[in-house]
Image (cartoon, rainbow, N blue to C red):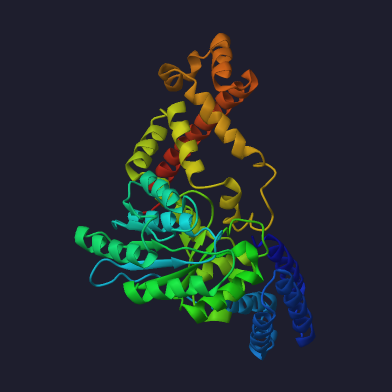
Amino acid sequence: MFDNLTSRLNTIFDRLRGYGRLTEENVQEALREVRVALLEADVNFKVVKGFIERVREKAVGQDVLKSLTPGQHVVKVVRDELVELLGGSAHRLAMAPHPPTVIMLVGLQGSGKTTTAAKLARHFQKAGQHPILASADVYRPAAIDQLKTLGAALELPVLGDPAAQPVAICRAARDEAAQRGLSPLILDTAGRLHIDEEMLAELKAIKKDVAPHHVLLVVDAMTGQDAVTVAEKFNAAVGVDAFVLTKMDGDARGGAALSIRTVTGRPIAFVGMGEKSDALEPFHPDRLAARILGMGDVLSLVEKAQAVVDQDQAAELAEKIRSERFTLEDFAQQLKQLRSMGPLEQLMDMVPMFKGAGMPKELRGEESELRRYEAIISSMTPGERQEPSIINGSRRARIARGSGTQVAEVNRLLKQHAQLKKMMKGLKQMEGRMGKLKGSLPFFGR
C-alpha cells in the first residue's frame, strides 16, 4: 500500500545521507519534498502540516546539524514522529473481568465488516479464547448466512435471526454467550452505503442496550480521505474505541492509516491484510513506520514464521538434515509452510533489503512455481518422494501428466532438491570443521 510513499521518502533520505554535513536549508528543502510526498499519499493536509512542523522543530536542532551522521538523525526524527502519528504504541483489546467481553463492529456496507468479524474471531480463537459470533444485519440479503458460513469454517457458533430486531438479536446473543461461558462475543451490525440517521439510531440503541466493552469501526483503507470523514462521523455519533483498517494489502496510497489516529484521537487496533480468516494482524505503529521508511518489518516476519512452524516438526527436520535424509516429502512440507505465511511479495516487503524495491527478479514468478512444485510432488508415489533417484524417464512423464506440468519442470524440481541436499551436506561438513576448530582454540568455551 505504501510503495509509492516509501520510494519517494527513500529518494529524499538517500540524498540527505549523501551530504557530508547538513544545513538548515538542506533540511527545509527535504521537508518540503516530504510534505508533497505525504499529500500525494492522500494524508490529511492538517495532519501533514502538524507532522512537518514537529519534524522541522527537531530536525534543525544543533545536535542534529552538528552530528557525524546528520542524515541518519533526520531519518530517526521522521521515524519517531511517524510512530507518534500512527498512535505511539500498539492498542490491545482488554478482556472484561466477567465474561463475555462484547465487541461491537460498526461501519459502512462494503467495508468488510462481516469478514472482519470472522477474522477477529479467528484471532481470539488462536489465542485460546472461545469466541461466539452474532449477526444483527437483518437488511442485507444473506448477511446472516454469510457469517454462519464463515463461522462454520472456523467451527464457531453463530447466532442471528432475520425475523428478529437487531437490538433483540444482540441482547439474546449476550445472554447466550454468558450462559455457555463463551467469550468474546463479536457483534456484526448492519451498515449502509452512506451514513444515515436511521443506521446511527439503531447503533446507538444496540450500544445502550448491550453496553459493549469495545466498539470497533471497520474502515476500508482503499477509500482514502473518505475513510477519515466516515471515522469522524461515526465517532461523533456513536462513539468509537478503535479502528480496524481493511484492505491494507491493496494498492491504495495509504493516507487513511496515517491520518485517522490524529483526526479522531482513536487508535488503530487491527489491519486486514487479505481475504483469508487469518489475514488480520494486530496493528504496531513502530513496525508500520519502519516499513514506510524502507526498514522492513522483521519482527512481523518472525511472528508469521512462528505461527506456521511446528516446533516438533522443525526439530525432526533438523535431524533429517544432519543425517542427510531430507526427502521430497520434507521439501513439500517446507513449501506448504512457506506459502501459508502469505504471498511472497508481502513477505519480501518485510525484509529491509527488499522493502520498496518490489519482488527481486530472482523470485518473480516463484509464487506460481511453488504451487507447481507442490502439485508435482503430490503426483509422486510415496516411494518416489522418499527416494527420488528411482524416478526415471517414464516416471517423470507420468508425474508431469498427473500434475499438469511439463517434464522439464519435473526435472527442475528434482535438480533443485539435489542441489539443496548437496548444500545441506556442505553445511554439515562445515559444522564439523568448526567443531574441531573450536576444540583446538583455548579461548572457546570459556
Residue 85: quarter of image: bottom right
Is residue 34 shown above or below 444?
below
Residue 87 visible somewhere in the drawing: no
Residue 119: quarter of image: bottom left
**Residue 212: x %, y % from top left:** 35, 72
Is residue 8 shown above or below 146?
below
Name the residue nearer the viewer: 368 or 419: 368
Is residue 107 shown above or below 411?
below
**Residue at image location 78% in from the left, 81% down from the top:** 26
**Residue 438: x %, y % from top left:** 41, 48
Q: Which quarter shows the C terminus?
A: bottom left
Q: Which quarter shows the N terminus?
A: bottom right
**Residue at image location 34% in from the left, 45% down from the top:** 311
**Residue 84: x %, y % from top left:** 54, 79
**Residue 97: x %, y % from top left:** 24, 72
Q: How many marks?
A: 0
Going by the picture, which residue comes out furthest to the top? 394
**Residue at image location 50% in from the left, 30% down from the top:** 421
**Residue at image location 64% in from the left, 81% down from the top:** 47
Name the residue nearer the viewer: 83 or 263: 263
Residue 263: quarter of image: bottom right
Residue 109 visible somewhere in the drawing: yes
